[in-house]
Image (spheres, grey):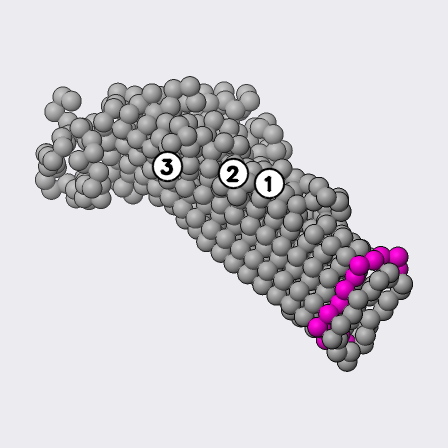
Amino acid sequence: MRGLSTLGVGATLAGMAGQASATSTADRYEEYFSRFDTVVDMSEAGADTSGNECICPLLHEYADDDTLLMFPPGEYLMTTQFRHTGYYNLGIVGNDATIVPGTVEEMDGRTSVAGTFEGPTRLFRLGVSYSPGDKLLFEGFDFDFTAKYSGFRVIEAYVEKDMLVRDIDIVGQHDIGSFGPALFSVTDPDGISSIEGFRAPDGGEHSENTIGTIWKGPTGILVPQSHKGKLWFRDCELGGFPDNGLYASSLDGRVVVDGGIYKNSCASNIRLKASYSYIQNATVVVDDTSGEYNQPGVRLDCGEGLWLYNTDIVLSDPCGHAVVVQNDVDRARIQDCNITVGEGEVNCAVSVSEEAGKVEIFDSDIEFDGTGNAITIRGDNDSSDEPVKLLRTHITGSGSGRNGREAIRITRKGVDILDSTIKMDGSHYRRGIDVLGDDCNIDGGVIESTHHPIVSAADGTRIDDMTLRSYDGYTGLKLYSDYSGVSVTDSTIYNGISDKGTIDLTTSNLEIV
């Protein structure tokens, strides 16, 4: 490579003695050297570390199979997209390296047509759906988006099986109304790749406030429909984006979100579609809203085996539900989660859609200070309804019943609520549970609320081993007329039962206080 500092397998750096920055870069990435036939220090290759000359010609010259390109400390200018497809075993890494894009003054669609940046508003396009690469390493860069109109797609990567993208920081808001910061796709069903520490905390601007025309605005991280393998997102961070934070749009490729912080995006902060995808150990926050756009915490759109585990969802300024289970979900579980919904309008902690399949909510705590229902479980109240189960789930709060009196509203047949508690002391006749679906089973636990703890207007309601108390002295249980098969057993009920005329009511071993 014409005398440039290169490395072969097992070799040592040549020609770098006394160069502290180069040595520290080599030290940082030495663990990767045995993987590549060639290692290039891009500053020695001629890359301008002061950010005055575009590095794209050098990227085109030296990017090759089995090659690692290292960028030592400095600023590096990009005034065009770098597109490289069909590669094998390519590494591009930085050590305190900052990429500074050129300026954009006018857009045509998603292309810059005026300014120092020319062409599609992407920086690194590493593979395309019809010519993906494989064995990609991309690590250790900051991207400076602090200048006006400087939001770009940092990386768009299509690989067959193997990709590691790590420690990428975007500084500044994405504000040109074009491609969002990242797109990742694994095209082979057997492929597994990982994105670790991808951070864009400043979010993106809505297109109506930019020079671009992309619908709504950018998506933080997009997983496209071409994704067929498995993608891990570990400890990533996204601020508010107009068109979803992390959006896994593929129906066929799994996505796992492990850790990280996702804040204030519209449409959803995390949105999953493929079967056996899950979220664990993450934090989702909505604390900055305009009230104009819907900002749910998590959307589970479709598939089976979707799982939300050990995740904190905090909607201190809610403008949407915390968790939404959509109609095309066949099976989902919410487990060991903490969900907080602050004061606001009709926003649920968990909303289960009418045609959704089996849903389980286990071992979770919900603090609900909003109006409306903490949990809404919709259904057709017939044999088409799949079961929903709450187990060891606890709801507390002081939210008003102004826009929905009951903490849990059930219009689905066959719901089980087991060993759970509700303590809601809000105004406007705040209740515990309204049962409007047949054959529901409430077994074990305590329900305390301002108004009636349980109101049943359904057939086959079974209440067992419960303590029911109204803070304002209403009856602990209210039963509407003309419904049959209701049973109430082994329970303590404050102020008795208000029975408006149920048919074949069964009671046994009740303590009326």
The residue tagged 2 is 275
For the residue marked with disc 2, what is the amino acid? Ser
The residue tagged 3 is 193
Q: Are marks 1 and 3 in contact (CB under 8 Å)?
A: no
For the residue marked with disc 3, what is the amino acid? Ser
* Main SS category, magenta section: loop
Instruction: Estimate the x, y position of residue 461 in percent, counting from the top left.
Output: 75, 59
Q: CA distance from mark 2 to mark 1?
A: 9 Å
Image quarter for residue 331? top right
- For mark 1, give the secondary structure: loop
Quarter of the image containing the N terminus? top left
Image label count: 3
Q: Is residue 145 above or below residue 322?
A: above
Q: Are marks 2 and 1 in contact (CB under 8 Å)?
A: yes
Q: CA distance from mark 1 to mark 3?
A: 26 Å
Instruction: Estimate the x, y position of residue 374 in percent, counting from the top left.
Output: 68, 57
Q: CA distance from mark 3 to mark 2?
A: 17 Å
The residue tagged 1 is 330
- Whichever of callouts 2 and 1 sits on the residue coming sooner in the sequence is 2
Q: Which residues are magenta?
A: 481-494
Q: Are marks 3 and 2 in contact (CB under 8 Å)?
A: no
